[in-house]
Amino acid sequence: MTSEYVALLGTKGGPAVRPGSSMPTSNLLVMNGQQIVLDCALGVTRGLVDQGMNLKTLSTIFISHMHSDHYLELGPLIHTAWCSGLVTPVDIYGPKGIRAYWDGFVASMKADIDLRIDDDGRDDLRAFVRVHEIDEGVVLERDGLTISAIRNAHPPLIDSFAFSFRTETKHVVFSGDTAPIKALEDFARGADLLIHEAMLESALPSLMERVGNGSDKLMQHWLRSHTFAHDAAITATNAGVKRLALSHLIPSDDPTYGPKDWQDACADHYTGELVVGHDGIRIDL
């Protein structure tokens, strides 16, 4: 096992959690000695601890877009890290709206935060969390790691991003939630690892029945805003990436389907190494 890796903490697409399902989307990236948390869905705190991370070392968080299955546990993660001994700055990078979320979270927790400052002698959590609302381009350059963003295609949201993490020797790209786009092929050109969202086309009708909301709006959202596994494979091939990992799986909790179905969906379109994501999997770089 190397010291540089990506851990897929939650690999389920969508915010619902059902018996037997995996957890929604969150990830830990470790490159050049830096720990980056990417997306903070329900379960991210437990997922980080299960990877052996000491929460008081939390420092950098990226949020891809403002859907709850990508940022619902952002505030609770930082608060829990604070209660675990965090005393150093935390930087949040995310789309427009992320600052309002953070301000709303600390306002909702004011009584608890004030009590812990007074009763436990803690530093003020609100003083060392820094929020950066981002746009396309280079977002952060630090200690040999360059992080860049492009807008992907996830309507109706506009500020929804894919991210590139690059050092002198490694290149990792996260698609974020997106329909297939040519720009992502260029963005991920030659990457060592592309983590791409994926839907299994044959499984969507039965998933709609299980959701049972009586409307075809959800199906229409999936079709215009997400990517089938075979299209993710085509993107990976066109980009010439060395490895492809599927995550944000739709569905992830149907026992009728397993890893082989995802592999079969990609087999005719990508011949490189394919990883079908599951919660807690660590991919060495």
Image (cartoon, grey):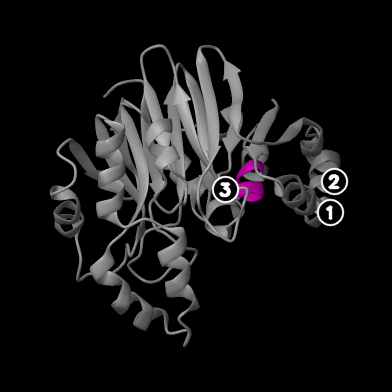
Which quarter of the picture shows residue 241?
top left
The residue identified by callout 2 is: 114
Residue at 26 percent across and 45 percent down: it is 234
Residue 59 at x, y = what percent?
A: 61, 28
Q: How far apart are marks 1 and 2 (CA)?
A: 5 Å
From what the image shows, is residue 137 above or below residue 26? above
> Residue sitting at 39 percent across and 50 percent down?
180
* Circle 1 SS class: helix
Magenta span of residues:
74-78
Looking at the image, the residue that sits furthest to the bottom is 214
Closest to the observer: 108 or 273?
Answer: 273
Which residue appears at 14% of the width and 49% of the height? 267
Q: Residue 127, position in %: x, y?
A: 81, 33
Helix, strand or loop at mark 2 = helix
Question: Is residue 252 toward the left or the right of residue 124 in the image?
Answer: left
Total number of numbered labels? 3
Q: Residues within 10 Å of mark 3 (few under 14, many from 20)?
A: many
Marker disc for residue 160? 3
Q: Position of residue 155 (x, y in %)?
A: 55, 59
For discs 3 and 2, the disc positioned in front in the rendered view? 3
Contact check, label 3 and label 1, Cβ < 8 Å: no
Identify the disc placed on residue 111. Answer: 1
- Specify the amino acid type for callout 3: Ser
How far is disc 3 from disc 2 in space, using C-alphas? 34 Å
| Neighbours of disc 1 within 10 Å: few (<14), some (14-19), many (20+) | few
The percent position of residue 113, horizontal first and vertical second, equals 79, 46
Q: Which amino acid does label 1 sit on?
A: Ala
Disc 2 residue crowd, few under 14, some 14–19, many 20+, Cα 10 Å: some
| Residue 75 is covered by the magenta coloring | yes
Element marked by disc 3: loop
Of callouts 3 and 1, which one flags the residue occurring earlier in the amino acid sequence?
1
What's the distance in space between the residues labelled 3 and 1, CA to CA?
33 Å
